[in-house]
Image: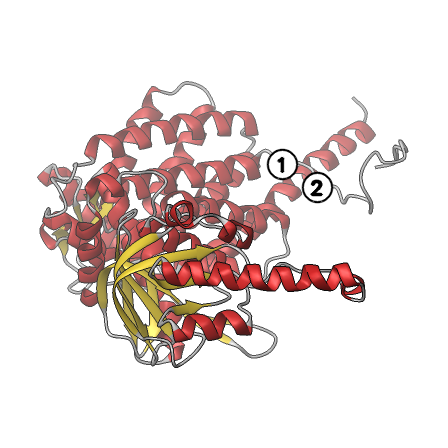
Amino acid sequence: MSLKQHASQGSEVDERLAALITNSNAVRAISAAVEGTLGPKGLDTMLVDRFGEVVITNDGVTILSMMEASHPAAKMVINIAKSQQEEIGDGTTTATVMAGALVSAGVDQVARGVPVARVIEGLRAGLRRAQGEIEKQARAVTGLDDPAIRQVALVAGREHEDIADLVVSAAKLIGQEKLEDTAFKLADAVLAEEGAENGVFMGVIIGKERMNKQMPKDLQQVKVLVIDDALEPEEIEEESLGTESGFARYLELQNEFRTNLQKIIDLGVGLVLVDRGVNDLAEEMLTDAGIMVLQRVPNKELSKAAEHCGARMVKRTGLKKKEPDLAKYLGYAQRVKSDEKLEQVWILEGSGKPMATVLVGAATSEVVGERQRIAKDAAAAVQAAVKGGVVPGGGSLELAVAREVEKLREETRGMAGFGVDCVVEALKRPMAQIVSNAGFNPLEKMGDVYVAQIEQGKASIALDCDSGEVADMLELGVVDPALVKIYALKAAGEIAEAILRIDTIIKMRDGKSGDDGDVNSDV
């Protein structure tokens, strides 16, 4: 082979490695943005937009979602972290930190000459073993009174006892069967409000005021009508009003609308929720009848209210139905009350699907968002614990699992073993970061934990971040949902494999590819 051919091959290898290194640096930057928040001593991050608006948070997925990221690899990490949040509701920071470690270790192995295919082969084998070990260590909770449930809420809720108690109360109100339903998310029941009192109740909150202060503000045993439309007469074209027949049709629609409103009154409806606007005639008649009306209710809140009350949504044309037929669309609630201070209406104890609302109070508007994020994390963690059990936290389990994956390394032949090494390094990363964030030397303290785990035969040994001493996480009550760990590892593996498989970066031309059949052969 000529010197020119050698140089050409070397240039091609360097170019492909450069793509890997570029992507690895982007992933590492994303990981660095959130790793400082990990653990009980993790600190907050300040996000500032171009208008000077500030968000201060400790929540990993919030940081990732709001941070400016233009690199494609960074966007991949953010998207997978969002998927983790959608799927399980927690663990995005751990997933991102482990993804950064996996990618960095993988690129180091490729730089040493290990083929990417062998690294990925080892990654897959190591991740399978790790996930299997986590599943073995998971302990099922023995119901919602299991002390581990509150501990999970406390850990995920960053040691806010009031939030942990609220979430556990809500879980008990909902019941285990509902929590195990994959379509239900307890985190969706969380709402934070400035100046509100902490509370949990069976019902939903509508973020709207009564449309008229003369309407009742507190109702008992209420029939509920939900209109997925405007509460107005059917419209008629303006040009038609200039004709005799058109004007006659207009008067007919007005009389029909008045008749429909009277039907609502005669049916004894106490609350009307409307998707869009309400006209003056409807406001006047319903106010005089002592009916509370909320207009322009967001569709999500409208749907939740309908489900909770057992109401069927109706269009304005549906109001033409005869009273017995229209009555079948009504829902029911034990109580409806208006909170003028919070500008809300509470619908309590509906006859439809049970729905709990966790109302988290906040002293100032600046902390409302963060209090809500903390409570949502706690709610998601509790639900995950109910579904998949709990494991010791503090990074203890990952370190113990790393030892088991090291055994796989001894069994693995060929270069795939280097990919298994990457998994071992990634599993050690959460504890190393937690220890570092607590102000201790990771090398020293992790060495102490490693020895203690082997001597005591416990996978739950980690570091007490207050004292700096080795301690049993289960005895300290530091537990995490097993599903959060499993999904975090899965998400980290998906990110790492996707990044490592990219060996060339090509800038696309503007416009849709293949539109004109022209292929650029000079790429």
Q: Quadrant of the C terminus?
A: top right
For marks 2 and 1, give the CA distance: 7 Å
Q: Is residue 249 visible?
A: yes
Which x, y percent locates residue 383? 26, 46
Q: Quadrant of the N terminus?
A: top right
Give the amino acid type for the residue marked by disc 2 in the picture. Ile
Q: Circle 1: is it few (<14), some (14-19), or many (20+) Cα within 10 Å?
A: some
Most foreground residue, 29 or 142: 142
Q: Is residue 45 visible?
A: no
- Please state if 515 lies on the left or on the right of 345 as rendered: right
Element class at badge 2: loop
Which x, y percent locates residue 257? 55, 61
* Numbered badge on residue 426: none
Instruction: Determine the residue positioned at 69% across, 37% down.
Output: 504
Q: Which residue is mark 1?
A: 502
Most foreground residue, 42 or 219: 219
The quarter holding residue 386 reads top left
Instruction: Determine the residue positioned at 32% across, 32% down.
Output: 131
Most foreground residue, 24 or 355: 355
Q: How many marks?
A: 2
Instruction: Determine the residue positioned at 47% across, 62% down.
Output: 261
The quarter holding residue 500 reads top right
Q: Circle 2: is it few (<14), some (14-19), or many (20+) Cα within 10 Å?
A: some
Which x, y percent locates residue 28? 51, 52
The quarter holding residue 132 reads top left
Element class at badge 1: loop
Which x, y percent locates residue 344? 36, 72
Q: Which residue is mark 2?
A: 505
Up-down relation of residue 398 to residue 211 (above or below)? above
Q: Are marks 2 and 1 in contact (CB under 8 Å)?
A: yes
